[in-house]
Image: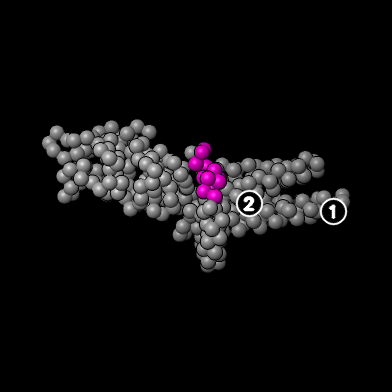
Amino acid sequence: MSRLLARLVAAQDGWARPFGDFNHRWLSALFHPIRPVKDLLNGVWLGHPLHSAATDIPIGTLLLTVILDIAGQTAAADIALVATILFMLAAAVAGAADYTDTDGTARTRATTHATLMVVALVILLVSLGLRATGGSDRTIAVALGVIAFLIVIAAAYIGGDVVYLLGNMVSRHAFRGAGTKWVKLDTGALTDLATLPEATPTKVKAGINDLALVRLGDTVHALHAVCAHAGGPLAEGTVVDGCIECPWHGSRFRLSDGHVRRGPALYDQPAYEIRVAEGGGYEVRRTAS
């Protein structure tokens, strides 16, 4: 069954890829000038993707609508349907903000997910109109509600793949240990960190980890070089207002402690403390969150 579903979803990529690229362009143009609003919709303030949290609500209220319709509770069902539509619109706006920073296969699948959700929303609006004007015969309106619910479930399945299979909006450091030991810092030909160029990220290695070093005055800061949001190369980023900015999607992390200062990243960046090693050179240790 899982393989069949995967093939059905992948079969939509032919139309979803170009359609997704088109939507990405106009949504990016829309959200770029209103970055604080975008951060709000991404969920930077919450430390969790707002869209994925918001989508649970309309699924629940739509299920309630179907149950109430079957039970003959018409007034309650209509109220639940109105709530479903409003919550779907709210979740869609949050999802659109995430969409502007979604790339590759994840964007293609997110396009399929979003398209199904829009189709379901249109069907629910038709159902609501029939309920308001259709008199006592609610058969078609109720049937449309059931159809919309099945489409929403299919869309939610694909949305789950975007997160759990493709890792969109998932912290790239979720499984990285906190670390309590000092690890030798491999700086290559660089022997004195005081000679690092000012406010210019430099990539080094600490064991299996790549770090981005930035010197600001007499202080050298170290953050993990893989952006927590989508794996962007922070060592190729820029320094802005005491933060390092990812070159891929513009997330900013405070150099002093790795805390998120601007989305779309939702999770803090691992930060490291540096000291001079006894045998010469330097060593690092991840700091507590």
Q: In which quarter of the image is the C terminus?
A: top left
Q: Which of 284 and 217 is in front in this view?
A: 217
Label 2 CA crowd tier, 10 Å (few <14, some 14–19, many 20+): many
**Can you name the residue that lies furthest to the left here?**
279
Q: Which of 209 and 254 is in front in this view?
A: 254
Q: Which of 17 and 248 is in front in this view?
A: 248
**Can you name the residue that lies furthest to the right here?**
135
Where is residue 157 drawn, in percent x and y? 56, 51
Q: Residue at x 69, y 48 (%)?
A: 85
Q: Does the magenta stretch include residue 51?
A: no
Q: Does the magenta stretch include residue 38?
A: yes
Give SS at disc 2: helix
Distance (Cα) linking label 2 and label 1: 24 Å
Q: Magenta stretch mostly in which secondary structure?
A: helix
Q: Quadrant of residue 176?
A: top left
Numbered circle sitting on residue 37: none
Which residues lie in the magenta part? 34-46
Give SS at disc 1: loop
Where is residue 207 drawn, in percent x and y? 24, 43
Give amino acid for label 2: Val
**Mark 1 = which residue?**
134
**Mark 2 = which residue?**
152
Vertically, is 202 above or below 285?
below
Q: Nearer the viewer, residue 225 or 167?
A: 225
Q: Residue at x 23, y 46 (%)?
A: 196
Q: Residue at x 77, y 51 (%)?
A: 128
Give amino acid for label 1: Gly
Vertically, is 9 above or below 87?
below
Where is residue 228 drawn, in percent x and y? 40, 45
Label 1 CA crowd tier, 10 Å (few <14, some 14–19, many 20+): some
- Determine whether, in the image, residue 263 is placed left or right of residue 147: left
